[in-house]
């Protein structure tokens, strides 16, 4: 479904991503794990069109994305939830969700999208008229994911969804990621919380210094001595 082939991305002289290749099949949860600064966010940002490809090819459903504008990528089914759960303060929960729906037309489709989001996140329904800024951190993360779902993605790109959340919410977010996949949305998730991410992932890739250094099923990577040593506290 999504194929990243020999991708390199630079920030001026900084080579952030160096010849990375991986794929995501329809219906999978795939995770990219690795330390701070390894290049994970840059890979997601490049897939959604926020950074330029220096070398390599990104394709989605056999269409090359390299020069496609971000907005067209969203329309073709790729939706990105950036790090830091950015919600719009001063707007209600429902208004925040509506902003995610710019790719869908018609009232009935719109209502169906709300219902689907509220099914994943009943708390957002309860709070739909509340200012988004008054939500807790975990609820804001749910809103950011819910907003992405409003665009009816085929694949959702999640950048550190568990970052900064209380333990109770971390578990919830990982459960929700599985639920989202179970409704037919493919998931590419980057995480520093490697243990939890690998537990729910079909497959994973370890990124170090802009390169892939290991790959396998979630189970294989959880069991790997090197991965345990570097990312799972031994
Ligand atoms: P994090 O979890 O901290 O986001 P990451 O694995 O996602 O880490 P990236 O954010 O992709 O890593 O960063 C990869 C490298 O590129 C790092 O060395 C980082 O300092 C650098 N970098 C990231 N964004 C920029 C930028 N806008 N300008 C210059 N260098 C950048």
Image (tube, helix red, strand yellow):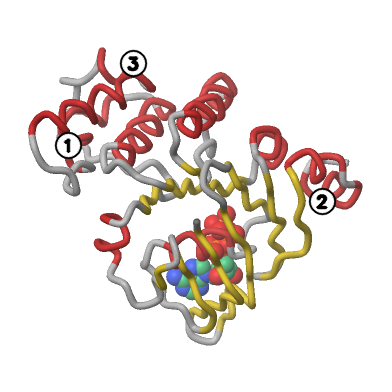
On the image, numbered disc 2 is attached to which residue?
230
The outermost residue toward the front is 62
The residue lying furthest to the right in this view is 225
Q: Say whether mark 2 is within 8 Å of ligand 1.
A: no
- Mark 1 to mark 3: distance in Å? 17 Å
Residue under pointer 3: 123
Closer to the camera in the image, 19 or 233: 19
Of labels 3 and 2, earlier in sequence is 3
Taking the spot 28% from the left edge, 39% from the top edge, the residue there is: 87
* CB-based contact (under 8 Å), mark 1 and mark 2: no
Work out whether 229 lies above or below 128: below
Residue toward you, 78 or 123: 78
N-terminal of the pair, mark 1 or mark 2, is 1
Q: Residues within 10 Å of mark 2 (few under 14, many from 20)?
A: few
Question: x and y percent of residue 96 in the render?
Answer: 21, 36
- N-terminal of the pair, mark 1 or mark 3, is 1
Decide: marks 3, 2 in contact (CB < 8 A)?
no
Locate residue 124, reporting x and y percent.
29, 20
Instruction: State yes or no: discs 1 and 3 in contact (Cβ < 8 Å).
Output: no
Circle 1 sits on which residue? 98
SS under mark 3: helix
Nearer mark to the viewer, of 1 and 2: 1
Dividing the picture into quarters, in which one does residue 197 lie? top right
Q: Quadrant of ligand 1?
A: bottom right
Secondary element at tag 2: helix
């Amino acid at each position: 479904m999504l194929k990243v082939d020999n991708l390199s991305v630079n920030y001026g002289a900084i080579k952030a991503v160096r010849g990375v290749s991986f794929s995501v099949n329809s219906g999978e949860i795939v995770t990219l794990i690795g330390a701070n600064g390894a290049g994970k966010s840059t890979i997601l940002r490049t897939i959604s069109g926020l950074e330029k490809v220096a070398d390599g090819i990104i394709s989605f459903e056999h269409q090359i994305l390299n020069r496609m504008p971000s907005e067209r990528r969203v329309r073709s089914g790729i939706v990105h939830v950036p790090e830091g759960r950015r919600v719009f303060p001063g707007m209600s929960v429902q208004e925040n969700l509506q902003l995610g729906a710019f790719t869908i037309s018609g009232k009935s489709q719109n209502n169906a999208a709300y219902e689907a989001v509220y099914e994943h996140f009943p708390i957002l329904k309860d709070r739909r008229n509340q200012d988004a800024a008054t939500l807790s951190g975990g609820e804001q993360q749910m809103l950011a994911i819910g907003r992405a779902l409003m665009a009816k993605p085929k694949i959702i790109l999640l950048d550190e969804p568990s970052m900064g959340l209380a333990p109770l919410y971390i578990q919830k977010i990982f459960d929700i990621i599985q639920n989202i996949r179970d409704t037919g949305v493919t998931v590419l998730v980057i995480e520093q919380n490697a243990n939890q991410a690998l537990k729910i992932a079909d497959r994973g890739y370890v990124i170090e210094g802009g390169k892939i250094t290991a790959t396998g099923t979630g189970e294989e990577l959880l069991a790997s001595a090197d991965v345990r040593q570097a990312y799972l506290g031994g």
